[in-house]
Each structure stands twice: as C-alpha cells, then as structure tokens.
C-alpha cells in the first residue's frame, strides 16, 4: 500500500481542530524542533531548538516583560502620587487648570492633558478644549469610563496637534461638574496608551482630578 504524504495545510488544520493533541501526546514534543525566535523566517538554515529549550526561552521573555511592566507601573505610580499631592494643594480653578494643562504633560512626557467641554465660556476662561456637544456625546460612553486606545483623528479632540497624537486616554467625567458631559483627555505621541499599561493608575488619577475639580467648582 502506498502511503499518502500529508500536506502541511492538513497538519495545520488537524492541530487547529484538535487543540489538546500535545496534551494527550506529550512524548511527541521530545522529537519536535522549534525556531530559535518567534519571528517567521524564510531562511531554511535558521537555528532550531528542542521544545524544552524553546519553552524556557519563552518563559524568560515573559518574565522580562512582567518585570518591565512592573518597573513602568512603579515609576508611573511615583509620578502620579507626587502629582496628586500638588493637585490637592491647588486653591482655585486658574491655578488648577494651569497645572493640569501646562505642567502635568511635561511631567508625564505627554503632548496634552486637558478637559473637553461644550461650553465656550469655560473653554475661553480656562483654555479648555471646545467641542460640540454632539461630538462629546459620541465619545462619552458611561460616566467614570476610561478608554485607552489609538487616537481617532476624526474626533477633533486635539485639533491642530492631531497629527502628533498617536494614542490617547479618554475619561468621562461626572455630569454634575459642568452640568454637561465633559471629558478628561491624555494625548501621547507614542503608543503610551495602546497596551493598557498602568490602566488602574490612570483611572485612579483621573478620579482624583475629577473630585478636585468638583470641589473647586462647588466652593
């Protein structure tokens, strides 16, 4: 009997349809080689390693990423705590918004930190970002919601600086602050907000800013 030679696609299809194959046939892994790195290569002579070594290598990479994330979060946490202490000391809205808009972006290596409102009087007085109410409505979602993602240049949030903003974080503030929907926005020229690093810290920081703003408007 002539044995049919399996095609690569058939093997791939089989493994995709049987995700537990290696769990049920662990001995097979001893005879399988893996690429030295995870990137695809057209080089037939690229180095290969056994499954055990491949697994160890990937665990080391994962551990390194965990350490890098922890380091990033630690540094961000320190910056946020220092900034919160300064925010809490602000006694009036002019000083508060000057610190928020002019100082904080530099401290966090961001292009923009600001508040988006549909009220022109507030925008003119405190140098806030002015957007139509219908545009803010589309971006708002739920109260106290934080979204971190690639920047949508069509939204018009960052206006003249839109080409510089690669990613952003958008926090939906309480309606009661301005008696209208408003947003706290963070804009970065890099991928700062795409991987959700320090999400909880930024959410916490946004809530502190919101509460301080609420206090100042209700003095």
Image (cartoon, rainbow, N blue to C red):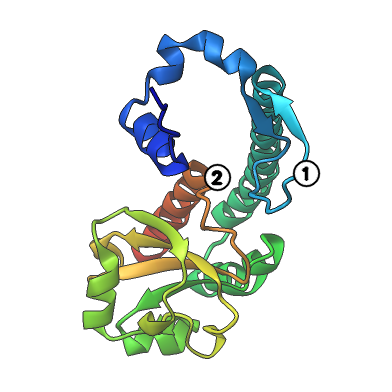
In this figure, which residue is indicated by the disc labeled 1?
45
Mark 1 element type: loop
Q: Are dots 2 and 1 in contact, CB under 8 Å?
A: no
Q: Residue at x 30, y 65 (%)?
A: 177
84 or 201, nearer to the observer? 201
Q: Nearer the viewer, mark 2 or mark 1?
A: 1
Quadrant location, the C terminus: bottom left
Count of picture labels: 2
Q: Which of 93 and 61 lies nearest the eye of the viewer?
A: 61
Residue assigned mark 2: 198
Q: Residue at x 66, y 60 (%)?
A: 108
Q: Percent x, y for residue 186?
A: 51, 66
Residue 178 visible in rendering: no
What label does residue 201 carry, if any? Answer: none
Q: Is residue 6 left or right of residue 119?
A: right
Residue that sits furthest to the front in the current view: 1
List x then y, in percent, for residue 8: 47, 41
Direction from residue 159 to residue 132 in the image, left or right: left
Of the pair 167 and 33, the residue shown nearer to us = 33
Image quadrant in which you'd find residue 2: top left
Q: Residue 21 or 165: which is nearer the viewer?
A: 21
Q: Position of residue 149 (x, y in %)?
A: 45, 61
Q: Quadrant of residue 176?
A: bottom left
Q: Is residue 86 above or below residue 24?
A: below
Where, by quadrant of the figure, is residue 102 drawn? bottom right
| Percent x, y of residue 205 | 50, 50
Residue at position x 33%, y 61% from top?
172
* In the image, residue 147 above or below residue 134: above
């Amino acid at each position: 009997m002539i044995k049919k030679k399996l095609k690569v696609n058939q093997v791939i299809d089989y493994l995709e349809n049987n995700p537990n194959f290696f769990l049920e046939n662990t001995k097979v892994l001893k005879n399988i080689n893996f690429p030295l790195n995870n990137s695809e290569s057209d080089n037939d002579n690229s180095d290969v390693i056994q499954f055990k070594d491949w697994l160890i290598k990937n665990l080391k990479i994962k551990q390194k990423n965990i350490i890098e994330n922890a380091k990033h979060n630690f540094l961000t946490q320190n910056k946020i705590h220092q900034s919160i202490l300064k925010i809490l000391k602000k006694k009036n809205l002019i000083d508060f918004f000057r610190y928020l808009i002019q100082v904080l972006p530099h401290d966090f290596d961001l292009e923009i930190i600001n508040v988006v409102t549909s009220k022109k009087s507030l925008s003119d007085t405190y140098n806030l970002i002015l957007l139509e109410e219908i545009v803010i409505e589309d971006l708002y979602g739920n109260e106290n919601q934080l979204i971190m993602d690639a920047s949508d240049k069509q939204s018009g949030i960052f206006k003249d600086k839109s080409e510089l903003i690669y990613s952003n974080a958008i926090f939906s503030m309480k309606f009661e602050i301005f008696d209208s929907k408003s947003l706290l926005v963070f804009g970065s020229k890099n991928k700062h907000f795409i991987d959700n690093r320090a999400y909880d810290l930024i959410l916490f920081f946004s809530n502190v800013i919101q509460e301080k703003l609420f206090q100042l408007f209700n003095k």
